[in-house]
Amino acid sequence: MRVIAVDMDGVLTIPENVQIVNKLAHMRENLIIVYTARGPWHREQTERQLQNIGVHYHQLIMGKLKADYYVDDRSTDLENLLEICR
């Protein structure tokens, strides 16, 4: 199982990135965790926002976590990650 951590802000606000994350989420060997630096009091708002933009994910973490890959606005490119995970 590969754990792929995807930052909410700066990544999932881009429609093309949402499409790639959704493809990764449907690969059985991937676990998609969305994380954000937002405080826990923003959880409901964040869950609604993810639903509204159509992100498929397995878990939402309010804070940073340990993962095999981090996708945020300062690291791994989603297009490259899609190729790695094939």
Image (tube, rainbow, N blue to C red):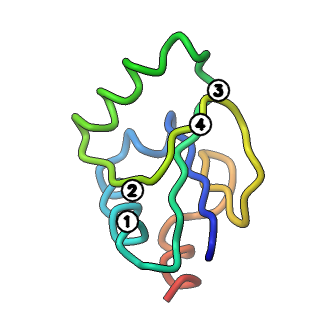
Circle nearer the N terminus (3, 2): 2
Circle nearer the N terminus (2, 4): 2
Query: Could you tell me how far apart the alpha carbons at marks 3 and 1 are, in whole angstroms?
Result: 22 Å
At mark 4, the secondary structure is strand
At mark 1, the secondary structure is helix
Q: Badge 3 is on which residue?
A: 37
Q: Residues within 10 Å of mark 4 (few under 14, many from 20)?
A: some
Q: Badge 1 is on which residue?
A: 20
Query: Could you tell me how far apart the alpha carbons at marks 3 and 4 are, in whole angstroms?
Result: 9 Å
Residue that sits furthest to the bottom in the current view: 86
Residue that sits furthest to the top in the current view: 41
At mark 2, the secondary structure is helix
Query: Could you tell me how far apart the alpha carbons at marks 2 and 1 are, in whole angstroms?
Result: 5 Å
At which x and y percent is residue 66? 77, 52
Quadrant of the drawing holding the N terminus: bottom right
Q: Could you tell me if the residues under marks 3 and 1 are in contact, i.e. CB atoms within 8 Å?
A: no
Q: Residue at 61%, 54% (x, y): give it.
A: 5
Q: Residue at 61%, 48% (x, y): give it.
A: 72
Q: Residue at 29%, 50% (x, y): give it.
A: 15
Q: Residue at 33%, 54% (x, y): give it.
A: 56
At which x and y percent is residue 31? 53, 64
Residue that sits furthest to the right in the current view: 66
Q: Could you tell me if the residues under marks 2 and 1 are in contact, i.e. CB atoms within 8 Å?
A: yes
Q: Which mark is residue 61?
A: 4
Circle nearer the N terminus (3, 4): 3
The label nearer to you, 3 versus 4, is: 4
Q: Could you tell me if the residues under marks 2 and 4 are in contact, i.e. CB atoms within 8 Å?
A: no
Q: Badge 2 is on which residue?
A: 17
Circle nearer the N terminus (4, 1): 1
